[in-house]
Image (cartoon, grey):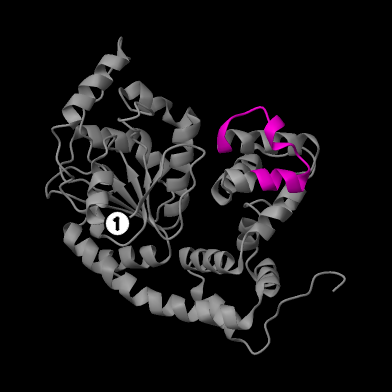
Amino acid sequence: MDLLEQLAVSWCQGRLLLVWADVPFPLAERPLANPALEIGRWQEAARTLGLPAWPLQTLPAGPILSLDPTARLAAAFRAAGVPLHPVRTLGDVPAPGQHNLLQLGGDLAARAGLFLGWDDVRDAPSDPDKAHLLAEAGRVVQGGVALVLAPAPDETFSRFWRELLGPALRGAAHAFAAGPRGFAWPAPLVWLAAGLEGVRAALVAAAAAAPADLAALRRALNAALDDAALTRFCRDHFPAVYREFGGGVDEAALAGSTPPEALTRLRQAVVQRFDEEGLRNLCQDLGVDYDSLPAQGKAGKARELLAALDRDERLAELVAMLRGSLDKAAKVQQLLDYCQRHGLLDELRERVGTARLAVSRWPGE
């Protein structure tokens, strides 16, 4: 299998991460005496920058980890009419089936999360928002491909890779780089001679082939299983998907002291699935007074709701309600996304295609 074929396979499995490595500003070697002044300089310089040299908006949808703090990528996507979902903080959840921009480089317009100096890079793994973005990037490339897109790489990028990106993406089976010939790419990056056009052609071909297969599987799932049967099917054969229906948490993990990562996943699920009115209704169903929660805004209210339920050992009730909050179409999409990401489409096709699906019944049914 050549390099482009590996890229296409990883994209089909949901294991391809694009790393936008265009770093427009140099980083300070020592902590700045006046960070606000440097941010102002960056904002002034950003006004003179054009759109990115490479049209990432022409690639099929997938996650993009960006070191660029400016709004140039967002502007390019907007100009092309292509949706781009920003993921900046711990409260942001990637949107399935879309381009997701993991803004590791921060948000220059909001003056937030910026790498002004190398001390910020060293501290990134201990910052909750940066750790969230790095963990999401690491999850995508586990066993897959990290593809660095760097039109004009320099020592700043190489240092970023050595000190932050390389360790965070070490679970990737392959790491490729598209950029100028002759640059000394840091290990283990392998230069991709085909460049962006070759990458685009391979991914577009893969995307053109994928929908027919997925559409057939979607029709088969909808024909074979009603909502309740689909839930049991996932519980019995794809337990990781079943856990995702309930916010990504196994009820067994809620016994005793709740792990912090379980609270984080539940909070993210609540924030993603409910608007403020929906969250108010969820609180009512749980017998919790929404207005008495000591926080403002949806994310804050969700955090305090989970804290209250955790204190009262009622998180399992929330998991059940989260599972019930998904309609059948959303469950089918999550199942397809998971199987595509993990190379399980053949297994799914085989299970759905059997004359009698081996779906056990709930106790007491």
Q: Position of residue 58 (x, y in %)?
A: 24, 59
- Where 96 falls versus 312 (above or below)? below
Q: Is residue 49 left or right of residue 115?
A: left
User: What residue sits 17% from the left and 61% below the top?
Assistant: 197
Q: Main secondary structure of the magenta part?
A: helix
Q: Is residue 286 visible?
A: yes
- Could you classify mark 1 by the number of other residues whose Cα lies within 10 Å: few (under 14), some (14-19), or many (20 or more)? some
Is 67 colored magenta in this rendering? no
Outermost residue toward the right?
364
Is 284 colored magenta in this rendering? yes
Q: Which residue is mark 1?
A: 82
The residue type indicated by label 1 comes to Val
User: What residue sits 47% from the left and 81% below the top?
Assistant: 216
As helix, strand or loop, the secondary structure at mark 1 comes to loop
Q: Position of residue 95 (x, y in %)?
A: 45, 53
Which residue is at the front of the view, 300 or 59? 300
Which residue is at the front of the view, 44 or 182? 44
- Where 159 falls versus 196 (above or below)? above
User: What range of the chain is rendered magenta?
Assistant: 280-298
Q: Position of residue 207 (x, y in %)?
A: 33, 70
Q: Is residue 30 visible?
A: no
Q: Position of residue 284 (x, y in %)?
A: 74, 45
Q: How many marks?
A: 1
User: What residue sits 79% from the left and 44% below the top?
Assistant: 255
